[in-house]
Amino acid sequence: MRLGPHLHRIGNDIVAAYLVDTEDGVTVIDTGLPGHWEDLLTELQAMGRSLDDVRGVILTHGDSDHIGFAEKLRQKMGVPVFLHSLDAERARGGNKPKTTMGPWRVFPLTQFALYGLRKRGWRPKYLAEVTEVADGDVLPLPGSPRVIGMPGHSPGSIAVHVPAADAVFVGDALTTRHVLTGVSGIQPAPFTDDPDAALDSLGRLAGVEASWVLPGHGAPWRGNPEALQDLARQAMEQTSKGKN
């Protein structure tokens, strides 16, 4: 799906990944689930591109529903996979801390599970090799993506700002569609290691100049990134009131 002149999405509101397309080639940001490989090939063809045009992959964090086809692409095409150093072990298949599931509803939870099965999420392909990045790095990839450290969902969660695409890619720093409840709108993402830290990290997006805010789960959001922390806090407070 084409979102803008340099911006494409594959997947859907349940699990999404993104492509930045410039005259220098293609940068892939997050790689969804293994079965999104076919979606990648289809979208590249629609763009008039091929795997030869992909220059690298950036992962917003190391969870299995974001590393998807990254290792396949690395092995097949020799492209580097960039990931924060604190999430490198997670992407290699290391243990992930257990988090509380939180609220859920049968239908959206079933949707999430069935989509994961269809896209072969039950068989993750972990990374054998990563290129580690840190907060503030500007990567040598199409669009000159800049890394913004966003610890909370995981220790090495990042956002990726690409001015050429007028977009900031936030991974699971927030969600616009809760995969367990189906609730839409800016809100904290489930399965977060440290929810308080994740909420604090959203303040780091306040100075980012971008019209698109692109999560790993949920619809693309257009607006001022400065509003995100307050919107997520309001959603969290609303959920808390609903429990009482």
Image (cartoon, rainbow, N blue to C red):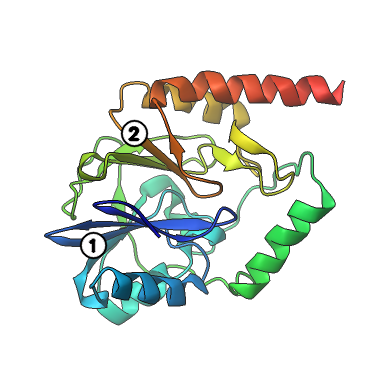
Q: Position of residue 174 (x, y in %)?
A: 54, 37
Classify residue 210 by image quadrant. Answer: top left
| Label at residue 244 | none
- In this rendering, the answer to whether 156 lies above or below 92 is above
Q: Position of residue 11 (x, y in %)?
A: 50, 62
Q: Position of residue 224 (x, y in %)?
A: 39, 25
Q: Is residue 128 visible?
A: no
For badge 2, the amino acid type reads: Ser
User: SS for tag 2?
Assistant: loop
| Residue drawn at x 48%, y 70% as measured from the top left | 36
Give the quarter of the figure containing the C terminus. Answer: top right
User: SS for tag 1?
Assistant: strand
Q: Is residue 32 visible?
A: yes
| Residue drawn at x 23%, y 73% as measured from the top left | 48
Q: Position of residue 79 (x, y in %)?
A: 25, 69
| Residue drawn at x 40%, y 21% as measured from the top left | 226
* Drawn side of residue 211 relative to residue 138, left or right: right
Of circles 2 and 1, the one toward us is 2
For badge 1, the amino acid type reads: Val
Classify residue 207 by image quadrant. Answer: top left
The one of 41 and 92 positioned closer to us in this rendering: 41
- In this rendering, the answer to whether 12 lies above or below 235 is below
Q: CA distance from mark 2 to mark 1?
A: 20 Å
Residue tagged by mark 2?
211
Give the quarter of the figure containing the N terminus. Answer: bottom left
- In this rendering, the answer to whether 143 lies above or below 103 is below
| Label at residue 26 | 1
